[in-house]
Amino acid sequence: MIKDLIKTHKRYVALAVVALAVAAYFVWPDGESIYVGTIEVTEVDVAPRVASQIAERVRDEGDLVKAGDVLYKLTCETQTVNLAKSKNDFIRAEKLLATGNMSPEQYDSYKKTYENNAYDVEWCTVRSPIDATILTKFHEGGDYVYTGTKLMALGDLTDVWAYVYVDQPLLVSLTIGQDVTGYLPELGNKPIAGKIIHIKDEAEFTPKNVQTRKERTRLVYGVKIKFDNSENLLKPGMPIEVRFAKLKK
C-alpha cells in the first residue's frame, strides 16, 4: 500500500516537472527558444546554541547584515547564574592547586566547566554567520526557543542562480562555463549576465520509450545558471527568462 502511494507520488511529481518545463518554454518570434527559471539564493538558517527566552530581536527582514552583526539577544538567566558559580569554583580551584590541596585532574574539571559556561553566555548573543540579507524572521522578543530552533533565514544575494529545463536536443549546444544572458520582463527585459555552472546528467522525466529521435525530444534536463547580482536586482522567487538560439534542423 505505502509503496504504491510512493510510486503514485513520484509519477505525479515527474508529470508536474514536465508540465512546468513545457509551461516555462516558448519560442520568440526571432527564432530564439526562451526558458523561464526561478531565482534561488544560498540560504543559511540561524539558530541559537542555547535554550533561552528571547530578550530582543535586533534586526528585521530585508536588512543587509555583515558576518558578526547581532541578530538576537537572549535573556539567559540560567546560563548567567551557572557562569557566576563556575567562575567562583574555578578561582577557588586555582588557589587550592597552588597550595597542593587539589589534584591537577580536579582543577582541569573546574576549568572546563567554567570555560563551557562562558561559551554558553557568549552564545546568548546570536550573530550573523555570513554577509547576507535577512529573508525571513521566525521569532520575536519574549518567545522561548530551544537549541537549534530556526530564528532567521539569511540569503547570500551575491550567490544567485536559477534552473531552467531544456529539451534534450538543445543539450548538444550547451557547455559548462558558457556565458548566457537572462532577462527580467518586469524591468523592460533588462539583460542580466549569467554563466552555466551545472548540467544535470539525468533527465527530469523519462518516457517509457526513448528509442526514437521523436521520443528523445520529450526529455528535459536541468541547466543551472549563475547570475551576476552586483546591482541587487535579483531576489529569491523572481522569474527570469533565458534565451537560447534555436537549433537549425
Image: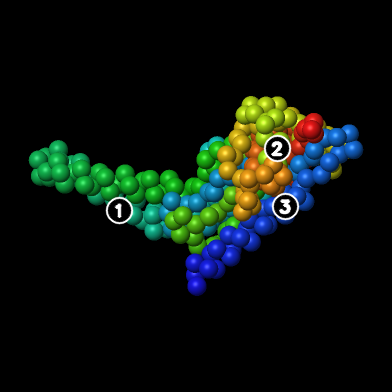
Colour scheme employed for the rendering of this structure: rainbow
Task: Give above or below for 133 relative to 230.
Answer: below
Q: Nearer the viewer, mark 1 or mark 3?
A: 3
Q: Which mark is residue 20?
A: 3
Separation of marks 3 and 2 at Cα, in angstroms: 18 Å
Amino acid, disc 2: Pro
Left or right: residue 13 versus residue 1 is right
Q: Residues within 10 Å of mark 1 (few under 14, many from 20)?
A: few
Q: Secondary structure at mark 3?
A: helix
Q: Nearer the viewer, mark 3 or mark 2?
A: 2
Amino acid, disc 1: Lys
Residue corresponding to mark 2: 169
**x and y percentages locating residue 156 in the rendered image:** 62, 39
Query: Residue drawn 84% across and 41% down?
Result: 27
Query: Which of disc 2 and disc 1 is earlier in sequence?
Result: 1
Task: Give above or below for 15 relative to 122.
Answer: below
Amino acid, disc 3: Leu
Separation of marks 1 and 3 at Cα, in angstroms: 61 Å
Left or right: residue 222 versus residue 103 is right
**x and y percentages locating residue 243 in the rendered image:** 78, 35
Q: Which of these two is toward me, 14 or 59?
A: 14
Residue 5 appears in the picture as rendered: yes
Query: Which of disc 3 and disc 1 is earlier in sequence?
Result: 3
Residue corresponding to mark 1: 85
